[in-house]
Image (tube, rainbow, N blue to C red):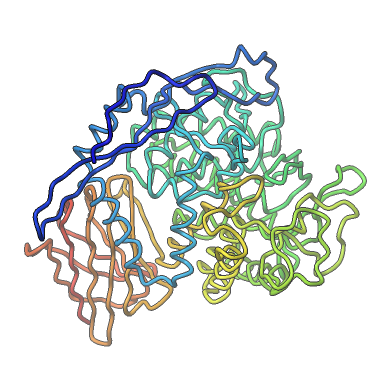
Amino acid sequence: GALPDHRYGPSEEGKSDVGTLALRATLQAGESVTLPFFLTWYFPNFIKYWQGVGEKCACEERPVWRNYYASLWRDALDVARYYALNEERLYRQTRDFHDALFASTLPPYVLDAISSQASILHSPTVLRLEDGTFYGFEGCHAESGCCEGSCTHVWNYAQTVAFLFPSLERSLRDADYTYNMREDGRMCFRLQLPLGSPLWEFHAAADGQLGGVLKVYRDWLLCGDDEWLRKLWPKVKKALEYAWIDWDPDQDGVIEGVQHNTYDIEFHGPNTMIGSFYLGALRAAEEMAQHLGDSEAMVTYCRVYESGRTRMERELFNGEYYIQKYDPAKALKYQYGQGCLSDQMIGQWFAHIVGLGYLFEPDHVRSALKAIFEHNWRTDFWEHPNPQRIYALNDEQGLLLCSWPRGGRPAFPFPYSDEVWCGIEYQVASHLIYEGFVEEGLAIVKGVRARHDGYRRNPWNEFECGSHYARSLASWAVLTALSGYRFDLPHKTLGFAPRLRADDWRSFWSVGTGWGTYSQRLGEDGGEATLNVIYGALELETLLIGGIMKRAKVVATRDEQVLEATAWPREGWLSVRFAQPVCLKEGQRLKIMLSW
């Protein structure tokens, strides 16, 4: 029968009432009915429940601000009403994304890595401030976030937010350059809340600060918003040129000062972990300066880059991989010296993602990546001594942060060196793929997911310093590497150079204005490429198809409309250029038929 309808007041403090909800319907034989239940909540105020670094305040003085969703809805009923009215659309768009991603011809364990770690964006690791600014801890514990402040050197690795929610990623850049910068350009690498709080007095993180320049470049390529870039440009320059105050005062392109970094210590002396970020930042800044007409800065950045590249190649490449050069008598402990560091080419990895090309000698880069896999990849851990945290053990596979194949291990190497970090594994795996070592890169991805198979560990939680750890958002780079994805919205260009099954390929793509799928089929006499816009829109002048080194006849259509286009080989790509920019709206398809 029907349940009696009761009305209760609020529950007592510290106590939650329980109850029963029921809906009634009368059905005739053969009929069906959907009875919807919407569970919504509304807690508009966010209380800063943790004490920030360097912060001193009593509990009753904790700052309070409003959650972002409180600016969109009035109460839980308003949320339920919105959902009820938009349920079909929200479900359809979610299903469209799922189907587009999982229709890719990527190996299942790659799709597993990419999709499972995207769940970090639906975990307590992240939150959204009242003005819409995205904010992240490094990870989260059972009752709190861990390691506050959208930590720049950890979020350097993360790629998922930039490609799935580019406006949220840009809000990280806006907050960083608005609230984390001092007058001389030194930046705090942990954003203090509430926004506008005093800066944490500590070293700048060299990897985080220089990586920020690359992230601005990536985010601009994804959105094509020149005004956004122009607004940030003075502070981006100041952040980069701070290196000439603290890390590279002689402007020879080599970082030599005290370099705080993601290993929670300071490196001393030249090394390519920080040095590759520096060269990448210089190249990215050179490109942005050229676009904005800042010719003086462009020339300077080019000069410093060339100098740094020459010297690092001469002094740091040992014939197999890149090392750290420092004076043990003067430097603090926790260095790596002659070690083979898995992060030694991280700036080069980022440069590949954003299409900057090689920062170092290509043969040396490939040699270094090959050495990282040969020396740091372990197929088991039965005899691996690790006095630090254990993230892989026994018969599991994993990539060490560092090894010393030629000897020279310091008495006190940098902390974590014997550990396995999923985020660095994804960084190295995707970089191996960029360099053509596809089998090796995929082996690493497969090993990571085997450790998180649901039996040994939670498949949605690749923990490091806390659960749902942000560094694992580097997994998205495996998609960009395997698809050879090139994006450049300022110049209305997309490109694809698949590194697996290029003759029959499908993958997901996304930019700031929309997302969809790309597929191609190639044969002896020609081929076809298809770009679908599933959500949003895309304006395109050039489509690049990788690996085709010959002229081709082209027939291009938008749905059934024939478009004027030409196709020419250029720098390893077949460049399909349209006579007029092609505007693709949601649901439209661009098809390229090629013959040669």
In percent of width and height, residue 245 lies at: 68, 31
Q: Which residue is at 18% across, 74% downward? A: 593
Q: Which residue is at 38% across, 33% downward? A: 19
Q: Which residue is at 59% across, 65% downward? A: 455
Q: In this rendering, is residue 407 above or below 293? A: below
Residue furthest toward the right?
Answer: 329
Q: Nearer the viewer, residue 45 or 594?
A: 45
From the viewer's perspective, is 383 left or right of 557?
A: right
> Residue 66: which quarter of the image?
top left
Question: In the rendered view of the protein, which quadrant contains the N terminus?
Answer: top left
Q: Nearer the viewer, residue 157 or 309?
A: 157
From the viewer's perspective, is 392 left or right of 413?
A: left
Q: In this rendering, is residue 559 above or below 34? A: below
Q: Which residue is at 27% across, 57% downward? A: 516
| Total numbered circles | 0
Does residue 581 appear in the picture of this structure? no
Q: Nearer the viewer, residue 341 or 563?
A: 341
Residue furthest toward the front?
Answer: 1
In percent of width and height, residue 113 lies at: 49, 61
Q: Nearer the viewer, residue 475 or 453?
A: 453
Question: In the rendered view of the protein, which quadrant contains the C terminus?
Answer: bottom left
> Residue 261: which quarter of the image?
top right
In percent of width and height, residue 229 lies at: 39, 35
> Residue 316: which quarter of the image?
bottom right
From the viewer's perspective, is 546 left or right of 35?
A: right
Does residue 460 appear in the picture of this structure? yes
In percent of width and height, residue 101 lies at: 34, 61
